[in-house]
Image: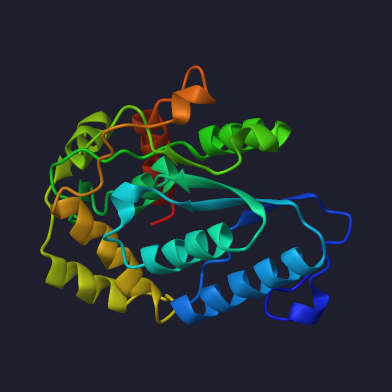
Amino acid sequence: MDFDRPETLDFSEVKTLFLVSAGYAEDDVVIRRHGAVLEAAGRQGVKHVVYTSLSKASDHLGFALAHRWTERAVMNSGMAWTILRNGLYAELIGALSAPREGRITTPFGTGPISAVARADLADAAVAVLAKPEAHAGVTYELSGTTPFSVVDLARQLEVSYEPTSLESERQRLSGLSLLPFQPAMLLSISSAAVAGFLKTEASDLPKFVANPRDSLSIACVAARQAYALE
């Protein structure tokens, strides 16, 4: 199936649809893709949609809009629904905070970030999909349960944390081989982190994962791997 070709969307005999966000594009493209999926799913007899959205704490991020639009569309679709509001991946925060020339310069402020291991999100999704009817009409916040700061990350990596300005980070991102929409998207993560908006006060993750993985350790691994590729 191709989200950009609605005629290929075939959900016949599918009762519960697990819709992973078709991001990696401009908002209008993501909205069009998700809208086409929901229209086809409703027409073809899908009974329940489980959608992977973005945590409430991430409302200030540049890519939150398409998620909130999709949440509303899912809720108004006429199908049963469950929203899994995933926190930012620990692997992503680690990769974005990878040291360069022995120091971390990405401006992420000093406040805690409720990043979460991707494997924990997968475990939570499997638990919901095992009995979707038990989770109908519910939105779950699935951020990490042990927030960490980039100061903590730098300490674990035994490097200095010397954050640049957002302007300098924008200039650095503009010089990388990224898609046109990506520099602004990535910079919005830095802006939200600097402003202290990436911490979640409460998480539903323990309802599904008894012992959540250590997000800081996972971020450290991702940072070391990204640093090795520099």
Residue 128 image-quadrant placement: top right
Taking the image as shown, residue 133 lies to the left or right of residue 92, namely right
**Front-most of residues 135 and 85:** 135
Residue 48 is situated, as x and y percent measured from the top left of the image, at 70, 50
Taking the image as shown, residue 146 lies to the left or right of residue 106, namely right
Residue 1 is situated, as x and y percent measured from the top left of the image, at 79, 69
**Front-most of residues 100 and 216:** 216
Q: Quadrant of the C terminus?
A: bottom left
Q: Residue at x 13, y 72 (%)?
A: 167
Taking the image as shown, residue 175 lies to the left or right of residue 40, namely left
User: Does the image show residue 98?
Assistant: no
Residue 5 is situated, as x and y percent measured from the top left of the image, at 74, 81
Residue 145 is situated, as x and y percent measured from the top left of the image, at 35, 28
**Front-most of residues 139 and 157:** 139
Q: Tell me if residue 120 comes above or below residue 82 in the rendering.
A: above
Q: Tell me if residue 77 comes above or below residue 91 in the rendering.
A: below
Q: Tell me if residue 107 comes above or below residue 169 in the rendering.
A: above
Residue 169 image-quadrant placement: bottom left
Taking the image as shown, residue 137 lies to the left or right of residue 230, namely right
Q: How many marks?
A: 0
Q: Residue at x 42, y 34 (%)?
A: 218
Residue 12 image-quadrant placement: bottom right
Q: Tell me if residue 11 comes above or below residue 215 in the rendering.
A: below
Q: Residue at x 46, y 67 (%)?
A: 69
Please, which colouring scheme is shown? Answer: rainbow
Q: Residue at x 41, y 37 (%)?
A: 116
Residue at the extreme top: 210
User: Does the image show residue 120?
Assistant: yes
